[in-house]
Amino acid sequence: MTRRAGVCVRWRASVVGFVVAGVFASSPVMAADTIREDQWHLDAMRASEMWKITKGQGVTVAVIDSGFKLDHPDLAGQFLPGRDFSDSPGGVGSYAEGHGTQMASLIAGTGKGDGGNGAYGLAPGVKILPLKIANGSEKPMVATEFLGQIGQAVDYAVEQGARVINVSQGIAAFRASDSDVAKLNASLTRARAKGSLVVSSVGNSAQSGNQVEYPGALPNVVGVGAADRNGVVAAESQRGPQVTLVAPGVDMIESCTGSTGYCKSHGTSDSAALVSASAALVWAAHPDWTANQVLRVLINTAGKPTDGSVRTDDAGYGAVRPRVALTDPGDPGPADVSPVPAAVPTSTASASASAPPSASAAPVPGEAGASVPGRESVGEEDSGAGSVVPVVVGVAAGVVVLVVAVIVVVARRRAVPPPPGGNPYGG
């Protein structure tokens, strides 16, 4: 199953440690004065300019995830009454890890935490419908339950009027039975027919098999990959025809359930949340548009792949640029025609055809080339929305404990070129 890996950060400390694939590592971090200043993706996407047009008011985004910290200061007042489909104790406001809270933060955070200097979402005017599923964080995950609960949550979200449904979760397709997939497909088809847009992460296993994941590779789902601040598709971000768009997914800062209340993370989960927020912004500005029209505009205004092709398996149709979608949307096209083909990869599709090169390329900026498993890499075989990696602060009573980690240079492929000015997301 897919969750994702996050790193909880103690801000204003000189040294931060984090666990990497079972090895404790530490590296110096120079913190900004506010959490918002470290949210590079909001500056790259020119959020302050978009918010003069809309912050997403009037749009409900359903987040199907692992539980939510409903009283986080950055999210207080942002949640609608939700529902728990997980059959685990505690209800929608209980959580074994912070993934659901982090996704809600990226979409709708208000920055009210940390004395008003907290984390913002890309669409802070939307309301979040929190829907909890069993993804393996509280009890062993069963594929039938996982896909079944996603389907139930999708149906419920549609009934509650959610225009955007974010599923930053996934499971390797080979684990899913035909009957389970058929049931989920039925829910996804109903959602699209009733006007909702389902957005999902494609997974973080590009370097370890590139296994196709569901629901991200199913019809009627917008599959999202991850890229860094330079528009370089992340090495972990899965490749294939299921990728519709890419969005920021490296060095992400967001609200979480850790001791400091804020985490640093990476992965396609984050990217999917930002595409969901982008869709919400466009829908708030054009409430009469259909899901097909909103998606078509996001595709048409995306930063395009470097080779001039319409799409690539790395970057899909390009890097999402909601500011351009808001200020120069162009023709939204027919209301009842999907802008993407229905063909999707199968669980037996060749991974080598779309996997990134394994040679050394540029390391992730700011991480000294250290490879950190994606949040969406959870369990022994499944990947996509990964387990949260705890961060250990290495400063206590004046004693700093540092353990050297093995540095792994990760492969990157430039797929979305920065336009003049070097900003692939702002237009």
Image (cartoon, grey):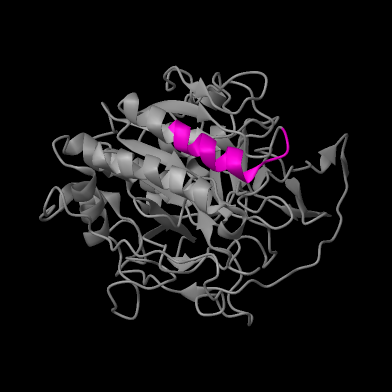
Q: Is residue 251 above or below residue 134?
A: below
For residue 321, what is the image quadrant? Answer: bottom left
Number of marks in the rendered image: 0
Q: Position of residue 385 (x, y in %)?
A: 58, 49
For residue 9, what is the image quadrant? Answer: top right
Residue 53 shows in this picture? no
In the rendered image, residue 403 lying in the magenta stretch gets the answer no
Question: In this orientation, which residue lies closer to the viewer: 11 or 269?
Answer: 269
Question: In this orientation, which residue lies closer to the viewer: 94 or 180?
Answer: 180
Range shown magenta: 139-153
**Residue at image coords 65%, 18%:** 90
Q: Position of residue 153 (x, y in %)?
A: 46, 32
Q: Is residue 298 above or below residue 391?
A: below
Taking 100 as reference, is 417 left or right? Answer: left
**Residue at image coords 30%, 34%:** 163
For residue 369, what is the image quadrant? Answer: bottom right
Q: Position of residue 223 (x, y in %)?
A: 41, 55
Q: Position of residue 52 (x, y in %)?
A: 23, 36
**Residue at image coords 33%, 56%:** 320
Q: Main secondary structure of the magenta part?
A: helix
